[in-house]
Image (cartoon, rainbow, N blue to C red):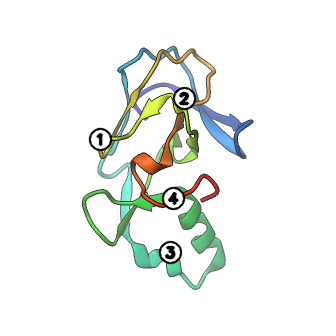
């Protein structure tokens, strides 16, 4: 995450990531950073260890440029919840922007469909 943020209980689902500062419309809020964010072969989703399978299925998404690979965000971005009216834009692979001014303390949301076809909010 490129902006101050924090994690807490979400009214949307479980826990979410929240703005720790006022974010202006158009600000870049997240970017894939090699070493912070990690790619894995999708086969890790078939791990024989149930707790690993569950974690990876919940917090990873398909790599936009490498078929068969998945991404695990190493920062609080992995806690961002889905919204059909998100306040962020992830249409450009590997980067996210604020769609609107986002006041400090507001939950950051995204449309999972922008970066992961077929991913549902329950995933």
- Which of the two labelled residues, at mark 1 and mark 4, occupies the earlier sequence position? 1
Left or right for 39, reference 11: left
Circle 4 sits on which residue? 119
Q: In the rendered structure, are the residues bearing label 2 and label 4 in contact, judged by CB atoms less than 8 Å apart?
A: no
Q: Secondary structure at mark 3?
A: helix
Q: Mark 1 or mark 2, which is nearer to you?
A: 1
Q: Secondary structure at mark 4?
A: loop
User: Circle 1: is it few (<14), some (14-19), or many (20+) Cα within 10 Å?
Assistant: few
Residue at figure coordinates x 33%, y 52% from the top left:
35
Q: How far apart are the two marked residues, 3 and 2, measured between alpha carbons? A: 28 Å
Residue at figure coordinates x 46%, y 76% from the top left:
44
Q: Position of residue 66 (x, y in %)?
A: 26, 65
Circle 3 sits on which residue? 45
Circle 2 sits on which residue? 5
Circle 1 sits on which residue? 92
Residue 35, above or below 98: below
User: Circle 4: is it few (<14), some (14-19), or many (20+) Cα within 10 Å?
Assistant: some
Specify the farthest residue to the left. 65
Task: Return the residue nearer the eye: 35 or 87.
Answer: 87
Q: How far apart are the two marked residues, 1 and 2, measured between alpha carbons? A: 21 Å
Q: How far apart are the two marked residues, 2 and 4, measured between alpha carbons? A: 24 Å
Residue 10, above or below 45: above
- Which of the two labelled residues, at mark 4 and mark 3, occupies the earlier sequence position? 3
Q: In the rendered structure, are the residues bearing label 1 and label 2 in contact, judged by CB atoms less than 8 Å apart?
A: no
């Amino acid at each position: 995450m490129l902006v101050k943020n924090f994690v807490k209980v979400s009214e949307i689902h479980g826990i979410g990531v929240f703005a720790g500062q006022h974010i202006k419309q158009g600000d870049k809020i997240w970017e894939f950073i090699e070493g912070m964010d990690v790619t894995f072969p999708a086969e890790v989703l078939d791990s024989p260890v149930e707790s690993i399978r569950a974690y990876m299925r919940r917090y990873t998404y398909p790599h936009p440029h490498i078929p068969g690979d998945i991404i695990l965000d190493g920062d609080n971005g992995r806690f961002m919840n889905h919204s059909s009216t998100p306040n962020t834009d992830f249409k450009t692979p590997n980067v996210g922007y604020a769609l609107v001014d986002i006041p400090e303390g507001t939950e950051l949301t995204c449309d999972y469909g922008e970066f992961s076809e077929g991913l549902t909010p329950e995933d």
